[in-house]
Image (spheres, rainbow, N blue to C red):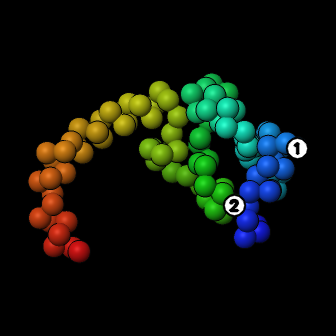
Amino acid sequence: MNINPFPMFARLREEAPLYYNAEHDFYALSRYDDVNKAVIDHETFISGRGALLEIIKSGMEIPPGTLIFEDPPIHNIHRNLLSRLFTPRKVAALEPQIREFT
């Protein structure tokens, strides 16, 4: 990518609002409104392979149960269960242990 990526982004929005990368078998959206619609349409768009190009290009298998790569409804179930472990009070209680490591 060039030092200034914005001309390339503009070209993508104009010429390839829905871009398919055959080498790594993924689609990418380049327009803001399309992305906003996609993030709430879990029937059409999945995040099972992630959104980071480096992970997609690596060909790494994502283990089942990896929260950030899950789609609803299972993502919501796991997130709700885990969120109970990360309340402000519980995180504050961990502060002394965290400070020992840093």
Quarter holding residue 56:
bottom right
Instruction: Residue at 15% x, 57% y: name it.
Output: 94
Camera-near label (1 vs 2) is 1
From this view, report whether residue 54 is shown above or below residue 22. Answer: below
Image quarter (top left, top right, bottom left or bottom right) of the C terminus: bottom left
Which structural element holds mark 2? helix
List x then y, in percent, for residue 89.
14, 45
The residue located at (61%, 59%) in the rendering is: 55
Q: Which mark is residue 15?
A: 1
Quadrant (top left, top right, bottom left, bottom right) of the N terminus = bottom right
Q: Position of residue 82 (x, y in %)?
A: 30, 41
The correct choice, above or below, for 65 with respect to 58 in the image is above
Q: Amino acid at mark 1?
A: Glu
Residue at which label 2 appears: 57
Q: Amino acid at mark 2?
A: Lys
Give coordinates of residue 100: x percent, y percent.
Answer: 16, 73
Query: Of 97 and 8, which appears nearest the observer?
Result: 8
Horizontal side of 16 relative to 83 (left or right) equals right
In depth, the one of 6 and 79 nearer the eye is 6
Q: Quadrant of residue 84?
A: top left
Looking at the image, is mark 1 or mark 2 earlier in the sequence?
A: 1
Crowding near pointer 1: few (<14 within 10 Å), some, many (20+)?
Answer: few
| Closer-to-camera residue (36/89) | 36
- Marks 1 and 2, Cα distance to the nearest angstrom? 23 Å
